[in-house]
Image: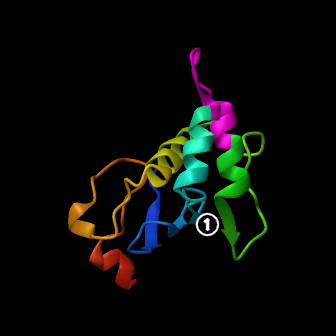
Amino acid sequence: MAKTNVTINEIESDGRMAVVTFVDGKQYKLQHPGNRTYIQWQQEYVTPMGFNMEEFLDKSFEHVVIPMGHDFKPTIDNIKPKELEVWQKLLRRFLGGDIESDQKAEKPVKGAERPTKAQAEN
């Protein structure tokens, strides 16, 4: 069975930058575009017809996800179908400010979990 949890390795106290190890084992930096830009994006991909997930992911992959130590830049077209759902959950949580820097405040949600103390030491 494929791994479906993301490890949050580091996050700035203001939540604007995080370093994660994705389910593919690669590290990525997530850089928040800023609140004003995020609000503008929301106005673009939340329409009367519903949530435009394609546009949300395209913008997020292009402007938020930065490869670290490799040159694989994820897009909707080059990731596995199972990874698409994990990216969707992770990016919505990150951009919405729902990934906390304080481990005690972290909500255990599959797809974006912090490493345990033992995992972090290994």
Q: Is 101 left, or right, of 32 in this rendering?
A: left
Q: Position of residue 16 (x, y in %)?
A: 49, 66
Q: Is residue 14 above or below residue 112?
A: below
Q: Is residue 73 above or below residue 43?
A: below
Q: Which part of the image, by quadrant, shows the C terminus?
A: bottom left
51 drawn magenta: yes
Count every numbered label the image shows and give the total: 1
Q: Is 118 left, or right, of 9 in this rendering?
A: left
- Give the extent of the magenta segment: 44-57
The residue closer to the viewer here, 116 or 105, is 105
Q: Is residue 84 visible?
A: no
Tell me the residue at 44%/75% (across/down).
12
How packed is label 1: few (under 14 Cα within 10 Å), some, or many (20 or more)? many
Q: Which residue is mark 1?
A: 28
Residue 11 location, quadrant: bottom left
| Element assignment for label 1 | strand
Q: Is residue 12 visible?
A: yes
The residue closer to the viewer here, 84 or 35, is 35
- What amino acid type is highlighted by mark number 1? Tyr
Q: Is 97 left, or right, of 24 in this rendering?
A: left
Tell me the residue at 68%/32% (across/down).
54
Q: Position of residue 75 (x, y in %)?
A: 74, 47
15 drawn magenta: no
Of all residues, the one furthest to the bottom in this rendering is: 121
Of all residues, the one furthest to the top in this rendering is: 49
Of all residues, the one furthest to the left in this rendering is: 104
The residue closer to the viewer here, 92 or 121, is 92
Tell me the residue at 50%/68% (across/down).
18
Residue 112 location, quadrant: bottom left
Q: Position of residue 35 (x, y in %)?
A: 52, 55
Q: Position of residue 72 (x, y in %)?
A: 76, 62
